[in-house]
Image (tube, grey):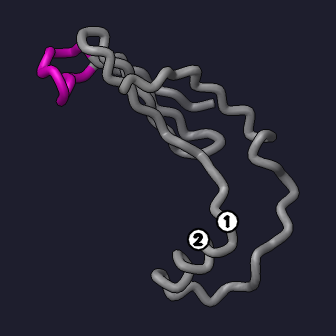
């Protein structure tokens, strides 16, 4: 797995180098981070579109491919665990 960690400034509270962030490129490009000063957290969300959403996005990009393929992997097979709490 290819991963890179870094500190960055928080756009919410303005604290310098308070976000502990990381990026990964496998199985998909993803990023996550947590601000140690104010609690802002973010992550890449992986989900599966339903048929209506998929067909709408295909129209937007003028995708001329075949119909929806039967997938060999379920979403749970990717085994991505971020354990990030949402702050409201």
Q: Residues within 10 Å of mark 2 (few under 14, many from 20)?
A: few
Q: Residues within 10 Å of mark 1 (few under 14, many from 20)?
A: few
Q: Horizontal and vertical percent for residue 69?
A: 80, 72
Verify whether residue 68 appears in magenta.
Answer: no
Which residue in the protein does label 1 denote? 50
The magenta segment: 8-18
* Quarter occupied by the N terminus: top right
Q: Residue at x 52, y 75 (%)?
A: 57
Labelled pair 1, 2 in contact (Cβ < 8 Å): yes
Verify whether residue 13 appears in magenta.
Answer: yes
For this rendering, which residue is in front, 88 or 28? 88
Left or right position of 40 against 71: left
Q: Secondary structure at mark 2?
A: helix
On the image, which quarter does residue 50 sit in?
bottom right
* Quarter occupied by the C terminus: top left
User: Can you say whether 61 is above or below 84 in the image?
Assistant: below
Left or right position of 4 against 58: left
Q: Main secondary structure of the magenta part?
A: loop
Q: Horizontal and vertical percent for residue 48?
A: 66, 56
Which residue in the protein does label 2 denote? 53
Q: Secondary structure at mark 1?
A: loop
Q: Horizontal and vertical percent for residue 12?
A: 18, 27
């Amino acid at each position: 797995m290819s991963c890179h960690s870094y500190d960055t400034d928080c756009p919410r509270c303005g604290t310098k180098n308070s976000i502990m962030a990381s990026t990964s490129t496998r199985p998909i490009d993803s990023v996550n981070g947590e601000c140690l000063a104010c609690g802002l957290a973010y992550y890449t969300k992986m989900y599966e579109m339903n048929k209506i959403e998929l067909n709408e996005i295909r129209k937007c990009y003028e995708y001329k491919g075949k119909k929806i393929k039967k997938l060999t992997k379920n979403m749970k097979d990717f085994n991505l665990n971020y354990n990030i709490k949402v702050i409201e």
